[in-house]
Image: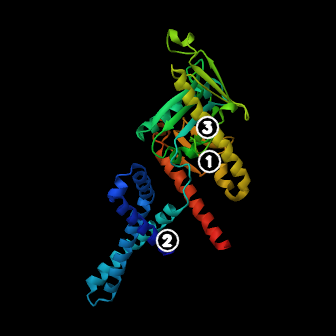
């Protein structure tokens, strides 16, 4: 198998890191121990899969000499064993290639989730609220934390816009393919003649940037405070706790009024601002790269219709990969994993093809 030498080196590195984690000098230094533990965790799945590959390969090698045995039963057993193990070896090798793919540096990051109602009036705001509920339920199942920074309700109880911080384990890696236009087809409750209406919302999933990724000069920021609006009791209209943050060089504006504390609102607004500035930087990089990764860049374009939700047929279709599932009712309850798995597998396969093409060109 190709990559064997590389995998041997990674396994040796993994064993060295395990020895370091047992070293009293490393254990007594929290920073060093944390770095070593993270480095080990980063390659643990790859090493486990490689060891599985070696074990299955070894079992096949053990079975092959039995094909020459004089005993017919032993030969049959060997053929059955090899027939069972060879497809398994192929599957493991494919999984190893995926694990060896360069990782998206943002995969481990938390995200800023932005949902906005588009065409469709009140119906679009109702769908935006349902989609936020979908993502919230999915996040709850993943044991992630969802913090709303701002929300604008419609007169019918929907959401014109909602912005939330989603924190947890590998959030961006699972939600990054959700960015784009989501279209809904259904009969609104207010429709008297039973006609199906089409509405749309936009979803943006931005990797949250930290201080290392984006430096914000205080001179570039203008902070305005104002009274919060909406539910919250008497203090809502008497306390200047809401924050509007403007980044002067770009004109980006972020508002946060979810918390009663101005300090907390300011901290949340800054997290959203960092994520938006980080996205601008990523877009510049992607434009510089040009067509090299155009297919992957396109998958995150918010102007691109990525998915249709047809309630009458209980059908959800992802147009990027041609996936159709007749379980829309379950998806709307937060069971999003089958779609996320299909998208991840598709784009991983595309990366493998791309790597293969680069290797041939070289």
Q: Secondary structure at mark 3?
A: helix
Residue 279 visible in the picture: yes
Report the side of 31 relative to 185 (left or right).
left
Where residue 37 sits in the image (x, y, percent)? 40, 54
Residue to which mark 3 is pinned: 274
For disc 2, the neighbor class at 10 Å (few under 14, some 14 to 19, many from 20) is: few
Residue at 44% over, 38% down: 144
Where residue 314 sits in the image (x, y, percent)? 51, 38
Q: Are marks 2 and 1 in contact (CB under 8 Å)?
A: no
Residue 196 visible in the picture: no
Earlier residue among tags 2 and 1? 2
Q: Which mark is residue 319?
A: 1
Q: Secondary structure at mark 2?
A: helix
Placement of 85 over or under 303, stated as above or below = below
Instruction: Mark 1 vs mark 3: give the one in front.
Output: 3
Instruction: Mark 3 vs mark 2: give the one in front.
Output: 3
The C terminus appears in which quarter of the rendering?
A: bottom right
Placement of 114 over or under 284, stated as above or below = above
Colour basis? rainbow
Where residue 147 sits in the image (x, y, percent)? 49, 30
Residue at 73% over, 51% down: 287
List the single residue furthest toward the bottom. Answer: 70
Residue to which mark 2 is pinned: 6
User: Closest to the observer: 229 or 14?
Assistant: 14
User: Closest to the observer: 269 or 75?
Assistant: 269
Question: Label 1 to label 3, Cα distance in Å?
Answer: 31 Å
């Amino acid at each position: 198998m190709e990559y064997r030498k590389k995998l041997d080196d990674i396994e040796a590195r993994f064993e060295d890191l395990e020895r370091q984690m047992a070293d009293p000098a490393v254990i007594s230094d929290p920073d060093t121990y944390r770095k070593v533990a993270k480095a080990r965790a980063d390659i643990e799945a790859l090493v486990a899969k490689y060891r599985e590959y070696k074990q299955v390969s070894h079992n096949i090698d053990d079975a092959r000499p039995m094909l020459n045995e004089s005993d017919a039963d032993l030969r049959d057993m060997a053929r059955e064993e090899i027939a069972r193990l060879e497809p398994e070896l192929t599957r493991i090798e494919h999984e190893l290639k995926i694990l060896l793919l360069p990782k998206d540096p943002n995969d481990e990051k938390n995200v800023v989730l932005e949902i906005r109602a588009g065409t469709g009036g009140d119906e679009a705001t109702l769908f935006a609220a349902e989609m936020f509920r979908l993502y919230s339920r999915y996040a709850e199942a993943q044991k992630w934390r969802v913090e709303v920074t701002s929300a604008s309700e419609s007169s019918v109880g929907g959401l014109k816009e909602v912005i939330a911080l989603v924190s947890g384990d590998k959030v961006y890696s699972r939600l990054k393919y959700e960015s784009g236009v989501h279209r809904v087809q259904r009969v609104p409750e207010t429709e008297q003649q039973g006609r199906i209406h089409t509405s749309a919302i936009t979803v943006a999933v931005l990797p949250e940037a930290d201080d290392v990724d984006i430096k914000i000069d205080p001179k570039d920021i203008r902070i305005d405070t104002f009274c919060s609006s909406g539910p919250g009791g008497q203090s809502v209209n008497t306390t200047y706790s809401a924050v509007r943050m403007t980044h002067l060089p770009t004109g980006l504006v972020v508002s946060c009024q979810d918390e009663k504390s101005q300090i907390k609102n300011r901290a949340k607004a800054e997290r959203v601002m960092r994520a938006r500035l980080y996205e601008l930087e990523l877009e510049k990089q992607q434009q510089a790269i040009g067509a090299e990764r155009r297919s992957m860049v396109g998958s995150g374009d918010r102007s691109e219709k990525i998915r249709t939700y047809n309630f009458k047929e209980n059908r959800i279709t992802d147009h990027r990969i041609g996936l159709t599932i007749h379980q829309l009712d379950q998806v709307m309850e937060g069971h999003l994993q089958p779609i996320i798995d299909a998208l991840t597998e598709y784009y991983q396969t595309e990366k493998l093809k791309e790597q293969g093409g680069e290797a041939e060109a070289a």
